[in-house]
Amino acid sequence: PLYIEGLWVTIQLVFLSLMLGFIIALPIALLATSSYPWIRLFPKAYIYFFRGTPLLVQMFLIYHGMGQFEFVRESVVWIVFKEAYWCALIAFALNTAGYTAEILRGTIEQTPFGEIEAAHASGMSKSILYRRIILPGTFRRALPAYGNEAIFMLHGSALAGVVTIVDLFGAAKIVNSRHFVPFESFITAGFFYLCLTFIIIYFFKKLEFHWNAHLRHRKV
């Protein structure tokens, strides 16, 4: 039962962090591809910080660091920052947003210039150009790299056990402390992580198969 509880917490953390991270990453990626250098400054700095520092450090800054500020402890946001679960979720979401933004930025810039020229020639506005041409192609090209990021986020979520959250890794630590069976406790957690990884791989393979259907050879 402890592993099942930890599995559910891990799934929650990974799913919510990926969802929130993607919502944060999309506007950052769009700003990072701006033609104005002063607009690119913040998104580039955000991407550089969260890709350049360890996830554990980021989580400790949020979980332990925010509590040292008196104005935070006396504000309404302390309801969030005093809970390990929400601190871990915020850290995971911000971290994966940095990596996802860089993936999207790269795939946006890979949009074939001929497609953009054709869209301009047909009279598309900039918003329609992004909605119909740039973003659909960006998401298709980003799928393989984003699938890897989802797997990395799953593996990184094991750090939640460091801040007292009973996820899969936290459950394994508790079992080991109770019964002194490190091999059995952690190999069981590893098995669950392996199963979740296969599910993520299968999901993204299905998405690639569906979204890239127009690239497959069809019989006449």
Image (cartoon, rainbow, N blue to C red):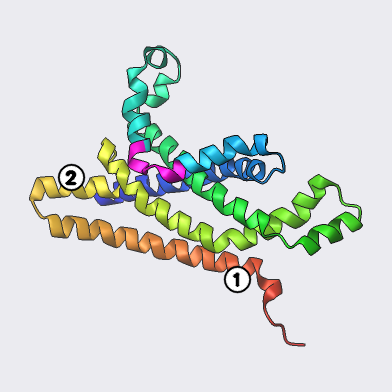
Quadrant of the image occupied by residue 181: bottom left
Q: Residue 122: give x, y in percent of width and height.
A: 91, 57
Point out the stretch of residues depicted in magenta: 50-57
Residue drawn at x 47%, y 55% is: 149
Q: Main secondary structure of the magenta part?
A: helix
Front disc: 1 or 2: 1
Residue drawn at x 73%, y 87% is: 219
* 1 or 2: tag closer to the N-terminus: 2
Other residues around mark 2 within 10 Å, as few (<14) / some (14–19) / many (≥20): some
**20 on left or right of 159:** right
Specify whether residue 56 is painted magenta. yes
Task: Tell me the CA gap for discs 1 and 2.
Answer: 41 Å
Using the image, tell me which numbered label, if any, was put on residue 178.
none
Residue flagged by tag 1: what amino acid is it? Answer: Phe
Residue 97 lies, with reference to residue 115, above or below; the image says above
Residue flagged by tag 2: what amino acid is it? Answer: Ile
Indicate the secondary structure of the residue bearing disc 2. Answer: helix
Q: Residue 107: give x, y in percent of width and height.
A: 63, 57
- Tell me the quadrant of the picture where the C terminus can be found: bottom right
Specify whether residue 78 is painted magenta. no
Other residues around mark 1 within 10 Å, as few (<14) / some (14–19) / many (≥20): few
Residue drawn at x 56%, y 46% is: 22
Which residue in the protein does label 2 denote? 174
Indicate the secondary structure of the residue bearing disc 1. Answer: helix
**90 on left or right of 114:** left
Looking at this view, name the residue that lies furthest to the left. 180
Which residue in the protein does label 1 denote? 209
Q: Residue 112: give x, y in percent of width and height.
A: 73, 63
